[in-house]
Image (cartoon, rainbow, N blue to C red):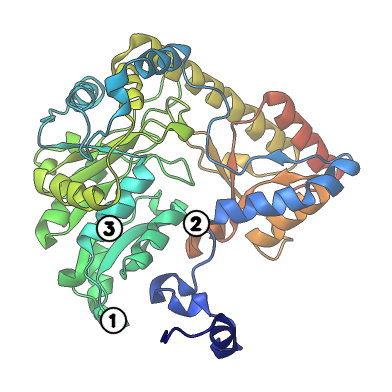
């Protein structure tokens, strides 16, 4: 005789309460919010119909991504590579030899840094992926806050740093970036402060730097990198450098440096580069890490559990772009446009009363970091009103950390006509400095 439970009995035995999937979340993501840029995008989408109806269709200065297509030669290389059957098979987390060799060539040509393509390069599905996976390879989970391992991150800085560290069970601690320290904080002093708070160097796993900065656009000097390398060596802290915007510098200005230009830096450094910004290839998801072989190996081990490398055709196109004079000319052309965009916006804000002569203007990136008019309660208040009344989308400085209060970030990648229209709306709608 069958002992199977009739379906009707199973139905009756089902608990009346609904399953609570959120209760199964890890502690590290339970209270985590959706990434700020996605939240802003949803808010803009919700408001678009009403804003458009009143003649204020959104003008976006929010997402830090080029809106032009990649170099045509780079696109052609991808199309050609897709016709090769072997390029549609699995790659490896470390990347194809031809791509790693192109990385080594690029690092030598651009920064004068010698890289071993076999041991000191790892391909990435964008630097964001690489950073998150490296944090996973560095941080050991600790259940109590007083034991959590620490990674120092810029504040204001890229929001994903802190979130990725928390997901791994680590504790991000801020490096205060302000005009007073020219966005280059005293690293040794910060470590001493943390020690006084009970966080000794033995709990600090890494220090993250990002120059030219997201969100301020400010660069650092080679001397500052030398100090960072010295501090990290002294305390056995991994230096993680994220110069995502290093190729986006204005004509006639000194090109931003790599931390690996410092003698002996490779002993303690891993550096992340992306093709997203300079080649306008944000959707392609391709980048690379270079640095100490042991750090590269740690990254590769984590990646080996979660991905099988970049599509080989994209690696082919990426390798081409990294060594192509035509693609280099494309970068320089875009940089000239970013400089013109900055000047247009600076002049327009000055006409609206902003004290632009007192603002530190970047000589790289497409970002503009400006103070909030004093009559607004906060950066969020200013950004919210500007969106709801004028349809202008900017990012409050607090999206990048506590020390971003009082500032907003503008990403100047839209057309000049839209920039002029935004300035016109600001004047018409009363968004002046006073």
Disc 2 versus disc 3: distance between alpha carbons? Answer: 19 Å
Label 1 SS: loop
Q: Quadrant of the N terminus?
A: bottom left
Q: What residue is at 18 percent from the left and 55 percent from the top?
A: 238
Asked if residue 364 shows in the view, the reply is: no
Q: Position of residue 319 (x, y in %)?
A: 29, 21
Does the rendering let one see residue 79?
A: yes
Do the residues under discs 2 and 1 have CB atoms within 8 angstroms? no
Q: Is residue 344 left or right of residue 216?
A: right
Q: Secondary structure at mark 2?
A: helix
Residue picked out by circle 2: 400
Residue 281 % position (x, y) = 45, 29
Residue at image location 68% in from the left, 25% down from the top: 416
Question: For the point 40% across and 50% down, which residue is it?
Answer: 183
Assess disc 3: are there few (<14), some (14-19) or many (≥20) residues with their C-alpha within 10 Å of its C-alpha. Answer: many
Q: Do the residues bearing badges 3 and 1 touch, measured as CB atoms within 8 Å?
A: no
Q: Of 394 and 347, which appears nearest the observer?
A: 394
Task: Specify which label sits upstream in the sequence, 2 or 1.
Answer: 1
Label 3, label 1: how far apart the Cα atoms are: 17 Å
Q: Residues within 10 Å of mark 1 (few under 14, many from 20)?
A: few
Pair 2/1: label in front: 1
Nearer to the camera, 216 or 241: 241
Q: Which mark is residue 143?
A: 1
Q: Residues within 10 Å of mark 2 (few under 14, many from 20)?
A: many
Q: For this rendering, which residue is in front, 375 or 164?
A: 164
Is tag 2's residue or tag 3's residue first in the polypeptide sequence? 3
Which disc is residue 363 wearing? none
The tag earlier along the polypeptide, 3 or 1, is 3
Q: Quadrant of residue 178?
A: bottom left
- State whether residue 110 is above or below residue 22: above
- Name the spot of residue 305 as percent of width and height, x first: 24, 52
- The residue that disc 3 covers is 135
């Amino acid at each position: 005789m069958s002992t199977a439970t009739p379906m009707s009995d199973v139905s009756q035995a089902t608990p009346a309460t609904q399953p609570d999937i959120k209760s199964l979340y890890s502690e590290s993501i339970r209270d985590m919010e959706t990434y700020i840029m996605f939240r802003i995008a949803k808010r803009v989408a919700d408001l678009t119909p009403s804003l458009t109806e009143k003649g204020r269709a959104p003008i976006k200065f929010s997402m830090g991504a080029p809106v032009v297509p990649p170099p045509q030669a780079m696109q052609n290389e991808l199309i050609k590579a897709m016709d090769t059957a072997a390029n549609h098979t699995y790659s490896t987390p470390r990347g194809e030899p031809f791509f790693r060799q192109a990385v080594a060539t690029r690092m030598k040509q651009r920064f004068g840094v010698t890289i071993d393509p076999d041991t000191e390069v790892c391909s990435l599905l964008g630097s964001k992926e690489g950073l998150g996976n490296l944090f996973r390879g560095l941080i050991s989970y600790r259940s109590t806050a007083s034991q959590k391992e620490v990674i120092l991150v810029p504040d204001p800085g890229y929001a994903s740093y802190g979130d990725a560290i928390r997901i791994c069970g680590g504790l991000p601690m801020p490096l205060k970036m302000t005009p007073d320290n020219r966005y280059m904080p005293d690293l040794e002093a910060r470590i001493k402060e943390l020690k006084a708070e009970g966080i000794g160097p033995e709990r600090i796993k890494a220090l993250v730097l990002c120059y030219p900065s997201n969100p301020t656009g400010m660069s650092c000097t080679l001397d500052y990198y030398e100090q960072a390398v010295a501090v990290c060596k002294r305390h056995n802290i991994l230096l993680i450098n994220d110069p995502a915007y290093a190729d986006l510098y204005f004509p006639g200005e000194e090109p931003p440096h790599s931390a690996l230009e410092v003698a002996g830096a490779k002993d303690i450094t891993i550096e992340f580069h992306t093709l997203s910004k300079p080649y306008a290839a944000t959707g392609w998801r391709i980048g690379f890490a270079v640095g100490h072989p042991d750090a590269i190996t740690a990254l590769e081990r984590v990646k080996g559990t979660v991905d099988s490398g970049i599509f080989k055709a994209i690696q082919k196109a990426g390798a081409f772009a990294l060594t192509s004079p035509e693609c280099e000319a494309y970068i320089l052309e875009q940089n000239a446009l970013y400089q013109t965009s900055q000047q247009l916006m600076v002049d327009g804000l000055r006409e609206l009363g902003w004290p632009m002569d007192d603002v530190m203007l970047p000589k790289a990136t497409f970002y503009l970091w400006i103070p909030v008019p004093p009559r607004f309660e906060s950066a969020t208040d200013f950004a919210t009103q500007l969106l709801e009344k004028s349809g202008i989308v900017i990012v409050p400085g607090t999206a990048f950390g506590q020390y971003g209060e009082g500032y907003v970030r503008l990403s100047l990648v839209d057309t000049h006509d839209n920039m002029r229209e935004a300035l016109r709306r600001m004047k018409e709608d009363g968004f002046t400095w006073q």
